[in-house]
Image: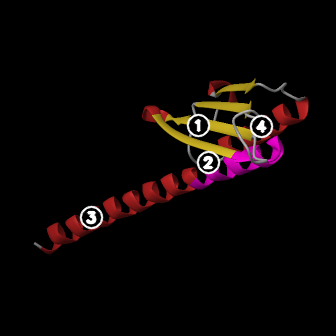
Amino acid sequence: MDEQSLDVKIESRNVGMTPRWKTEIERRVAALQMGIIHITHARVTLTKNAHHKKGADNAEALVVITLPRKRTVTARKESKTFEEAIRAAFLAVDHELEKIEEKRVARSAKAAGKKSQKREALSVA
């Protein structure tokens, strides 16, 4: 996969972006890109919502991954720290990408099975 074809946008709202968070996000996006599924665009937004939340979970990470054919996978996770929110959001996205790949493999296997049955039926006849 060509790394130059992947467009990554990282932004923050109501909080300053630290180099550590940016490095962590870039590392996790690169890890997703190493997977089987081709990723065309990744957008990560970190938001601090202190005045809207009564609880301690006021760090939010939103990860939006765009796949070919305009399919998207989105995960929004809230936690006490941005590190935890980033980790949870990327784990959720990774899980969704695994499910998409499992479905693709199952469809391919099913199609291959139908082709072999068709060939057997033609060879018997």
Task: Provide the secondary structure element on which disc 1 rests.
Answer: strand
Question: Left of 1 or right of it: where is 10?
Answer: right
- 32, above or below 125, in the image: above
**Mark 1 and mark 4: span between their CA atoms?**
13 Å
Residue at 55% across, 52% down: 96
The secondary element bearing badge 2 is classed as helix
Residue designated by label 2: 93
Residue at the disc numbered 4: 25
Magenta-colored stretch includes residue 88: yes
Are dots 2 and 3 in contact, CB under 8 Å? no
Placement of the N terminus among the 4 image quadrants: top right
Magenta-tinted stretch: 78-95
Q: Residue furthest left?
A: 125
Which SS class for mark 3?
helix
Q: Mark 4 and mark 1 in contact (Cβ < 8 Å)?
A: no
Amino acid type of the residue tagged 2 in the rendering? Val
Q: In the image, what residue type sits under mark 3? A: Lys
Mark-to-mark CA distance, 3 and 1? 33 Å
State the CA–CA distance, disc 2 to disc 3.
32 Å
Side (left or right) of 72 relative to 9:
left
Question: Which one is nearer the viewer's eye here, 92 or 2?
Answer: 92
Mark closest to the chain's N terminus, 3 or 1: 1
- The answer to whether the residues at label 3 and label 4 have Cβ atoms under 8 Å apart is no
Residue for badge 3: 114
Residue flagged by tag 1: what amino acid is it?
Answer: Ile
| Residue 21 coordinates in the image, percent (x, y) | 84, 35
